[in-house]
Amino acid sequence: MTHRFPLRRSIKSYAKKLMMNPLCIRATLMLVCMSVGLFGIRSVTGSNLTMGLVNLADYADTATGIYQNAEGFSIILRMDLTQMVLAIPVAYDQLVRFGIMMLVAYLVLSPLRMGAMEQYWSTLRGDQQQITNVTQWFRKKNLFGKALVVEGLIQGVVRFVGMACAAPAFYLYYLFYSNVKTVDDLTTNMVMLQNGASCLAIFAGLLWLWLHSAMLPIRYCLAAHPEYTLGQVFSRGWASMQGYRMKFFWFRSTLLPWFFFSQLTYNILDLYVTPYTSIASMIYVQECAKDRMARNSSQEELTESEEAE
């Protein structure tokens, strides 16, 4: 028994077809509208942490560092070589509002996202379930708790590891701009330092994507089997892609442009990106399961044949 893995373009084409299902569209609308709405509230209430590039002349006498003030603090990184300064102003009350809004978004979007994922799975499997299944992740305490735990683990671990991996790159950039004030300071060692920082930043990004891709099947496992315990979700979700994680990672990497465009539109493009990338990934996970079953069946047949001989 053999299984022929479909081409990437075939998987993506099928995903585009399935995402047009009315139930998928309504589930996506609920998720994206709530996400954009919460982002709008954060913007209106000043709960977003911002940063910007300003002219070096405005900070002529300010060195790189962290500066306290009456309202909070500012993080300053001088980039004399480019005549620019990276400024990150942070107010204490802004941090409080940011934390509250992040908590609200987590409590609201986690079960809503899981409900949307369940609807995508139902469409993929041909189940004609009602849109009320999206809201059941709010109404049922056990499902609500599972959604929070799974989403919290995925987002928490991925973000923590991503920041930890990016820290060395930021430090090397800091050393570079601290030592290179003019073009005359641009020595071979400094160029190597900058290239090293860029390589570490790229590595951190790839590691973040790999880890996110590796943990994503845990979310899909819960969405496909809400009746599972958390232990079953984590163990079976993680084991489901054993031997296929790198292939799944490369498949997810082909979807990166869509994630990038989504960020440029403040997640409004998620009306297309979320169902497309999610369903395409689910199809890929499903094909991996079929391939594993085919391999195991072939191995059993071979073993039986050897024993018969």
Image: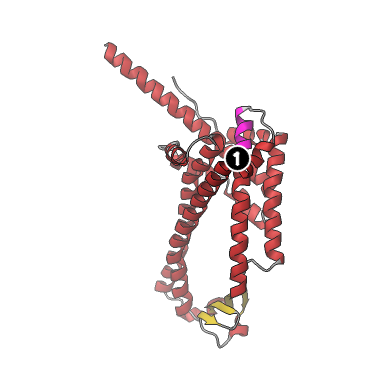
Residue at x-position 55% and y-position 45%: 147
Mark 1 lies on residue: 117
Residue 215 left/right relative to 280: left
Quarter of the image where one finds residue 12: top right
Q: Quadrant of the C terminus?
A: top left
Camera-side residue of 46 and 270:
46
The answer to whether residue 276 of the structure is visible from this angle is: no
Q: Is 185 part of what is drawn in magenta?
A: no
Residue 70: x percent and y percent?
59, 83
Q: Give percent across and percent down for residue 192.
A: 41, 68
Is residue 194 depicted above or below 35 in this figure? below
Compared to 123, does 256 lie above or below?
below
Q: Looking at the image, can residue 219 be seen?
A: yes
- Find residue 79 and report its image quarter: bottom right
Where does the magenta region start and end? 118-125
Q: Quadrant of the N terminus?
A: top left
